[in-house]
Image: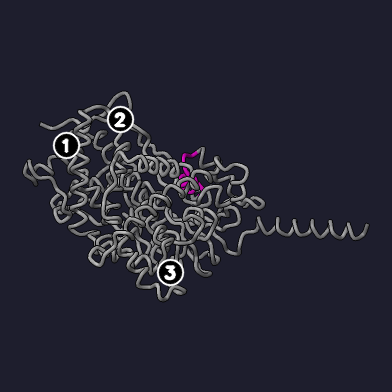
């Protein structure tokens, strides 16, 4: 009997010890809500996020409640810190100690069970492959005239599609994503994807559903991965597994086509050819190389996910704001007409300096809607401090981009949509350090040149040829849908051909 009592006492003691440890805050950890046993703040965050309309709004609420621009949370077993002011955000962006990425179930699931690719890796693998990918993308035209030619071609096809609508009510979000994706896919695989390709439609649909089910913290699959065994649909586990399978098959087909047609002449013509050449050259050192078919698939996946939604959603929101603000649309159109002949439409980024108001409008759309209100996640590579608080090694750091873009002390009237804030007294674009839609530092979004070029070219072409009008039966809302990125609610406008 005594042995049984000893066993029970030991088990109870073990459980009690871990219960106390699960609610204990690290010494000098940033302020925030108390941790619940084992789950930390997971359920509290999810509950309040549903009530407020997104995690970013909960974080802002808690910052006010605890009178701190740095929040300390625990989600599942992970310590999480949220930075909510420009000085703190800037420090996280530029300090190498915050260059890491968390290594958890959700991020590994996102990359098909591995820790590969560019977006979700760190250390030598991240540095080596980010440099390689950017070098090769520049080689095939990323950020240069070749990229602008791809954009010009896709924009022309987009205009034809809009013209065929014959001013019928339509939601721009229903047709913009393939246009943006085709530019990126051409740089990656050397050719575009047909708009009516059933595989493309299926992938875009799943990506859209993925962006709504998950959040920047990965949702319950990060904090409670075991739930996938009991609620695979509710947790999004089945969706992301299906998405992984579809994308793997889609990318592998393109890779195999490149492998069969590879010659010395074309091995530099797109990213896939260049990567396959690199694999062949490093084959002799196979044990030490990080270049592999799996890593290539993960790299393409990162580019695919990054380029498929953020730029198209921003373009969608820009068209929505033009419809909601006819005076702004009129000024953008006047600027385009004043700088171009009727037969010309801007594509080359070197012309952007002649369109200060148009560029200011695009920047204000990015600031006002901040479709990635919380960016990251980062991981502290070692014990460090931030704002005087201790940040333990492996703590996850989230970056409050929306808090910076809506900082009233800096912007004055951030709640107002006012493109003029980005134009100085001389009528030129004002470069504001608080404006950071693509981040800062070494982990700054590598696709910013593509995004800026697509936004500028698509919008100027559309506004030059069409007047965007609201449809009373489906008016837009400035309240966006929460998820990994914020997305506009479906609405409808008419594209009326200008005379």
Farthest residue, direction bottom = 285
Say which of 211 and 42 sits in front: 211
SS at circle 2: loop
Q: Which residue is mark 3?
A: 290
Q: Which residue is mark 1?
A: 330
Q: Which disc number belongs to residue 85?
A: none
SS at circle 3: loop
Say which of 329 and 268 sits in front: 268
Q: What residue sits 49% from the left and 45% below the top?
A: 58
Q: Earlier in the sequence, mark 1 or mark 3?
A: 3
Say above or below: 267 vs 494.
Answer: below
Q: Residues within 10 Å of mark 2 (few under 14, many from 20)?
A: many
Q: CA distance from mark 3 to mark 2?
A: 47 Å
- In the rendered image, residue 118 lying in the magenta stretch gets the answer no
Q: Earlier in the sequence, mark 2 or mark 1?
A: 1
Q: Residues within 10 Å of mark 3 (few under 14, many from 20)?
A: some
Q: Residues within 10 Å of mark 1 (few under 14, many from 20)?
A: some
Magenta stretch, main secondary structure class: helix
Q: Which residue is mark 2?
A: 492
Residue segment shown in magenta: 52-62
Q: CA distance from mark 2 to mark 1?
A: 20 Å
């Amino acid at each position: 009997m005594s042995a049984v009592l000893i066993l029970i006492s030991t088990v109870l003691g073990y459980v009690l010890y871990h219960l106390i440890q699960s609610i204990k805050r690290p010494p000098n950890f940033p302020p925030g809500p108390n941790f619940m046993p084992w789950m930390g703040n997971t359920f509290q965050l999810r509950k309040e996020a549903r009530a407020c309309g997104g995690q970013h709004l909960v974080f802002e609420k808690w910052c006010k409640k605890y009178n701190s621009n740095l929040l300390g949370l625990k989600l599942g077993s992970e310590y999480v810190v949220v930075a909510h002011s420009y000085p703190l955000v800037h420090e996280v962006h530029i300090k190498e100690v915050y260059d890491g990425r968390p290594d958890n179930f959700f991020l590994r699931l996102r990359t098909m069970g591995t820790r590969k690719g560019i977006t979700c890796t760190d250390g030598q693998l991240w540095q080596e492959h980010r440099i390689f990918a950017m070098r090769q993308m520049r080689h095939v035209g990323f950020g240069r005239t070749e990229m602008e030619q791809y954009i010009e071609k896709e924009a022309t096809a987009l205009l034809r599609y809009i013209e065929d609508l014959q001013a019928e009510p339509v939601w721009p979000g229903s047709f913009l994503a393939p246009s943006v994706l085709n530019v990126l896919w051409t740089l990656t695989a050397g050719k575009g994807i047909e708009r009516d390709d059933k595989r493309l439609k299926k992938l875009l649909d799943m990506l859209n559903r993925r962006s709504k089910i998950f959040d920047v913290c990965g949702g319950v699959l990060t904090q409670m991965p075991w739930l996938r065994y009991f609620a695979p649909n509710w947790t999004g586990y089945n969706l992301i597994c299906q998405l992984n399978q579809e994308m793997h098959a889609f990318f592998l087909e393109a890779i195999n086509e490149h492998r069969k047609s590879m010659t010395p002449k074309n091995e530099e013509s797109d990213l896939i050819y260049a990567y396959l050449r690199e694999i062949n050259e490093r084959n002799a050192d196979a044990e030490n190389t990080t270049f592999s078919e799996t890593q290539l698939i993960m790299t393409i996946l990162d580019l695919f996910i990054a380029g498929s939604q953020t730029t198209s959603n921003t373009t969608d929101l820009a068209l929505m704001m033009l419809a909601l603000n006819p005076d702004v649309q009129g000024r953008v159109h006047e600027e385009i007409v004043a700088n171009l002949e009727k037969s010309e439409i801007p594509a080359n980024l070197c012309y952007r300096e002649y369109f200060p108001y148009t560029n200011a409008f695009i920047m204000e759309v990015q600031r006002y809607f901040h479709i990635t209100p919380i960016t990251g996640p980062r991981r502290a590579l070692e014990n460090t401090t931030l704002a005087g608080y201790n940040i333990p090694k492996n703590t996850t750091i989230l970056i409050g981009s929306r808090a910076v873009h809506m900082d009233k002390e800096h912007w004055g009237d951030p709640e107002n949509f006012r493109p003029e804030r980005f134009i100085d007294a001389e009528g030129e674009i004002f470069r504001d350090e608080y404006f950071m839609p693509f981040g800062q530092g070494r982990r700054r979004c590598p696709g910013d040149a593509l995004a800026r070029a697509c936004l500028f070219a698509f919008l100027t072409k559309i506004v030059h040829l069409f007047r965007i009008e609201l449809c009373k039966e489906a008016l837009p809302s400035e309240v966006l849908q929460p998820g990994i990125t914020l997305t506009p609610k479906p609405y409808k406008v008419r594209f009326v051909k200008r005379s």
